[in-house]
Amino acid sequence: MRLVTYLDSAVARVGAVHNHAVIDLSDIAPDMLTLIAAGPAALEAARSRVANADGGRPLDGVTLLAPIPQPRQNIICLGMNYAAHAIESLRAKGLPEVLPAYPVFFSKSSSAINHPGAVIPLMPELSSQRDWEAELAFVIGRGGRNVSREDALGTIFGYTIINDVSARDLQARHQQFFFSKSLEGAAPMGPWIVTADEIPDPHALGLRLRLNGETMQDSYTGDMIFDIPTIIATLTRGMRLAPGDIIATGTPSGVGMGKTPQRWLASGDVLETEIDGIGVLRNPVV
């Protein structure tokens, strides 16, 4: 299923996309976090509703929000998790081109979450080096601690797209990721969550980013240095993941910082982030 959060008379509701229509699921769960936490029974009820649905609201007439507009905690992110991107980042900073031996974790503020089709604020008064990062993200369905690699994929509720919009000058100035990646609107997410049963191998997905129609990033998720089971097993050795937690798995090469000459976002740009099996997340920059 493709699960969405959408606006209905200014009220956020949870629904499922079926045959280019949105089927309301708000009597099963009032929001996405509740649906995820309710477990398999709620998901089966949603599947039954979709299978027996008659019509629904046309998808192109609905305003979609990020699938989880207000998560309970910050987005957990992976840095330098694709070899070519790690090299381009280190080279751009004049650092030794050595790949990380362990996953590089940081967080991105939940207040940065943005919606499908929504504007990414450029904020030129704050940063002149805004960059893009196409990323596969997964959403935890069954949380816990000390999850083994073998059990890790079974804890996932579904997958979505995140564009980890970054301010490279702030990143260098403050010598950390959090502020530079947490500006308002800097985490477009969506357009929906695709449930895990529809993506049997999350490491076999094409991943692309287009800037004004020109392909900037073109890779596949099998190029991750640390795969999803490793990410989950590593995190849960020391912390408890909970239903609804969002983890972004890193970006491949092709970001603006790594280009010659470097390319930064400008007002009027349009970003399209695409992952096979999920869809396209489109956002203008103003």
Image (cartoon, rainbow, N blue to C red):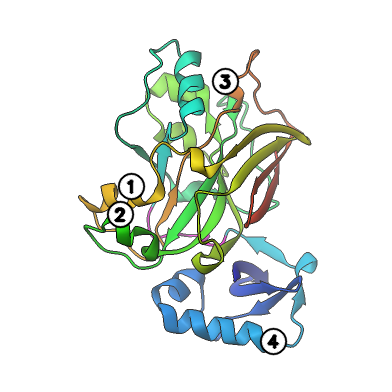
Instruction: For the residues labelled 1 and 2, say whether their Cβ atoms are less than 8 Å apart.
Output: yes
Q: Distance from label 3 to label 4 (Cα)?
A: 48 Å
Look at mark 1 in the image and give the residue it sits on: 230
Q: Is residue 239 above or below residue 174?
A: below
Is residue 157 something that shows in the picture? yes
The local secondary structure at tag 3 comes to helix
Look at mark 3 in the image and give the residue it sits on: 258
Chain-order first, disc 4 or disc 2? 4
Magenta stretch containing residue 72, yes or no? yes
Q: Is residue 102 above or below residue 158?
A: above
Chain-order first, disc 3 or disc 1? 1
User: x, y percentage for residue 29?
Assistant: 50, 80
The local secondary structure at tag 1 comes to helix
Look at mark 2 in the image and give the residue it sits on: 149
In the rendered structure, which segment of residues is drawn in magenta?
Answer: 67-73
Q: Closer to the observer: label 3 or label 1?
A: 1
